[in-house]
Each structure stands twice: as structure tokens, then as C-alpha cells.
Amino acid sequence: MVSAPSGAGKTSLVNELVTRHEDLAISVSHTTRPPRPGEQEGIDYHFVSEEQFREMVRRDAFLEHAEVFGNLYGTSREWVQAQLAQGISLILEIDWQGARQIREKMPDCTAIFILPPSLDELERRLRGRGGDGEEVIRRRMEAAVLEMEHYREYEYLIINDDFHRALGDLESVIRGAGLRRELQERRHRQLIASLLGSAP
């Protein structure tokens, strides 16, 4: 799980990370918000109506779901389970509310929080996106402070003051998490069995 306030650079870092590692994929969430310019259905999000989303909630189809800035977001339980069954490690870009829900259902997941180097830089990045009015930026800045208050709920904390350094830090965390004993045992079951079987 990777969380961050809007504008901290989370999406850019995660997108770059998955281009470097073919065994990593980004979880594609469902959302009721309209697509931004350039976003594609099934790649950036699954764009659904509020009625469709609420029907999925009734069917308990989400591992987590939350309302953010008046829009609904959720992570499909079935899709995540199918990816994990294929041995693909997933990155879930979610807010602290979703992270809490995921932790309850998947307590062995790795939780990473990304902070901006300053509030001034965060605001500069939000303004640099273009398209958002003053009121939207003001609301996003207020929400960012509330989001950042939850950083203590995560095992890892990365400061995105330099993109390449932050990317290296994120890569180190992901690589370390992938070397956990229980995951390595599943991946290398035959090797471990042969090594232990050949022991005197």
C-alpha cells in the first residue's frame, strides 16, 4: 500500500517503479469520478456510475472503499486475489481510510507513506497540474494536512524531495518486502525442500 497527500508525487513514483519491475503491477481501482484528460478505462481506473459502485458495495466486492473529494473509490477483491494467485505483487495507491480497511483483511501487507518536502512545494505541484481552480486547490491543501496526520500508521516513510532518491527508497522497500521469509518459502518451495532433503 502506498499513500500520500494529493500532489506528493505518489503516482509518478509508482508508475516509474512498475516500468522497472515486470513482477509488479498497480492495482486498478474503481471510481465514480470522471476521467481526467489522458486517463484510460481499465488502465488508470475502472470508471463506473455511483449506482454501479453502490451495487458492488452491497455485494461486498471491494477489499476497501472510501469517499474522497465527493467521489467514491474502491479496490476489487476478486481482481486483487486473481493477481496475487498469479504471483504478481500489487501496489495499491490508496488513502489512509482504505489502508486501514486493507490492513484488517490483509495484515501482512507492506504500508508506505510518501510526504512532500514542504507545504509550499506541495501547493506548487498542485498548481502545476493545471485545470484546478483556487477553491479546489484550497480544499486539496486542507485535505493534505489531514491525510499527512496518519503517516504514523505506516511502516515506511519516504520524503519526496528528490524524485530519483525517493524512487530508490521506494524500490528498496518493495525489494525488501519481497524477500520476506513467507513469500520466499512459497516461491522457492522446491529449492528449500531439496536443500533440506540433502542435509545429513
Image (spheres, rainbow, N blue to C red):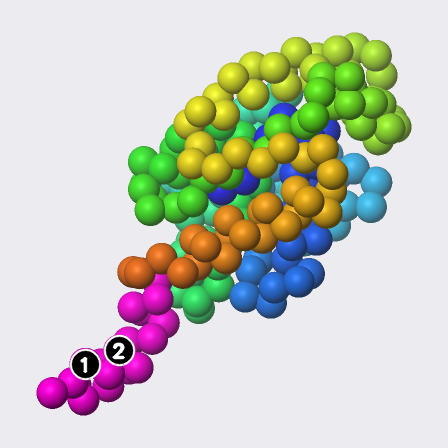
How far apart in space, not on screen, are marks 2 and 1 (Cα)?
6 Å
Main SS type for the magenta part?
Answer: helix
Q: Residue 72 placed where, x, y %?
A: 57, 29
Tell which residue pokes out farthest to the left in this image. 200
Q: Residue at horizontal 18%, vertical 89%?
A: 198
Q: Residue 197 placed where, x, y %?
A: 16, 86
Q: Residues within 10 Å of mark 2 (few under 14, many from 20)?
A: some
Residue beneath label 2, please?
192
Q: Which residues are magenta?
A: 183-200
Q: Is residue 22 above or below residue 7?
A: below
Q: Residue at horizontal 39%, vertical 65%?
A: 85
**Left/right of residue 79 with respect to residue 191 in the rendered view:** right
Residue beneath label 1, please?
196
Q: Residues within 10 Å of mark 1 (few under 14, many from 20)?
A: few
Tell which residue pokes out farthest to the front in this image. 200
Q: Residue at horizontal 77%, vertical 17%?
A: 120
Q: Is residue 8 above or below residue 76?
A: above
Per the image, is 190 magenta?
A: yes
Does residue 49 show up? no
Q: Amino acid at mark 1?
A: Leu
Look at the image and tell me in which quarter the C terminus lies: bottom left
Q: Is residue 107 above or below residue 149?
A: below
Quarter where residue 161 is shown:
top right
Number of numbered tags placed on the structure image:
2
Marks 2 and 1 in Cβ contact (< 8 Å):
yes
Q: Which mark is residue 1?
A: none
**Left/right of residue 126 with respect to residue 4 in the rendered view:** right
Pick the front one: 180 or 7: 180
Per the image, is 194 magenta?
A: yes
